[in-house]
Amino acid sequence: MSGIGLSSLAPFFKGNSLESEFGFVNYYHSHRINRLLHTCAIPLLIFGILTMTYSIDYRLALFFYIFYCGIVFLFDSKTAISYMILFGILFNLTMNFSSQSTKSILYGFLIFFYGLIMQGFGHYKFQQSPPAFRLFEAIFTTPIFLMMYIITDHNKPFWNNVQKETNKWKQILNK
């Protein structure tokens, strides 16, 4: 499960491997409703950002699309393809519902903000802990973890290692 340039992302990880990083994310998103809220909020966040950037200039939205999926590709190519499809669908919706106006930027911001509220609610109400508040994790690692969790077989050695790392984080962080 290692992408082409995963080692180039290592400085952004809290753990010392992708399995350890995902173990950390899994620990902070272990409650099923919190995980579900995050999974539902991610398309809203992406749609909100695409709406805001498209409303300013469609090339800015395309740049965001390409840049984000490029970073995801460093993690895992199958996950990157899944995100390219998700972005494509959301970009198409953005083109149909956005205009180059302040109103569209405001709508994009409100959609984005609603996605953040959903995630915060999941953490405080169900996970009963605040988010980790690490920027790279919030923008990339958690969404990638959630997509990989949805699209892959959980019986593979990779996910067994993630679970072992989750248990290590649990011991470290519950002291």
Image (spheres, grey):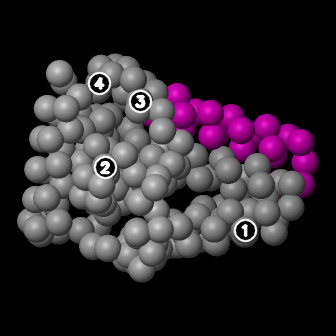
Q: CA–CA distance between discs 4 and 2?
A: 24 Å
Q: Indicate the position of residue 66 as horizontal and vertical percent values.
A: 64, 72
Q: Indicate the position of residue 11 as horizontal and vertical percent values.
A: 46, 55
Q: Which mark is residue 63?
A: 1
Q: Is residue 167 above or below residue 146?
A: above
Question: Which quadrant would residue 107 be assigned to in this image?
Answer: top right
Q: CA–CA distance between discs 1 and 4?
A: 35 Å
Mark 4 vs mark 2: give the one in front.
Answer: 2
Quadrant location of the C terminus in the rendered image? top left
Mark 2 vs mark 3: give the one in front.
Answer: 2
Q: Which mark is residue 126?
A: 4
Q: Indicate the position of residue 31 as horizontal and vertical percent values.
A: 23, 34
Residue position marked by numbered label 2 in the rendering: 15
Q: Amino acid at mark 2?
A: Gly
Q: Which mark is residue 131?
A: 3
Instruction: Identify the residue at image location x=29%, y=26%.
Output: 127
Q: Is residue 41 above or below residue 87?
A: above
Quadrant location of the N terminus in the rendered image? bottom left
Instruction: Mark 4 or mark 2: name the one nearer the start of the chain.
Output: 2
Task: Provide the residue span drawn in magenta.
Answer: 98-119
Q: Amino acid at mark 3?
A: Pro
Q: Is residue 29 on the magenta stretch?
A: no
Q: Indicate the position of residue 27 as horizontal and vertical percent values.
A: 24, 38
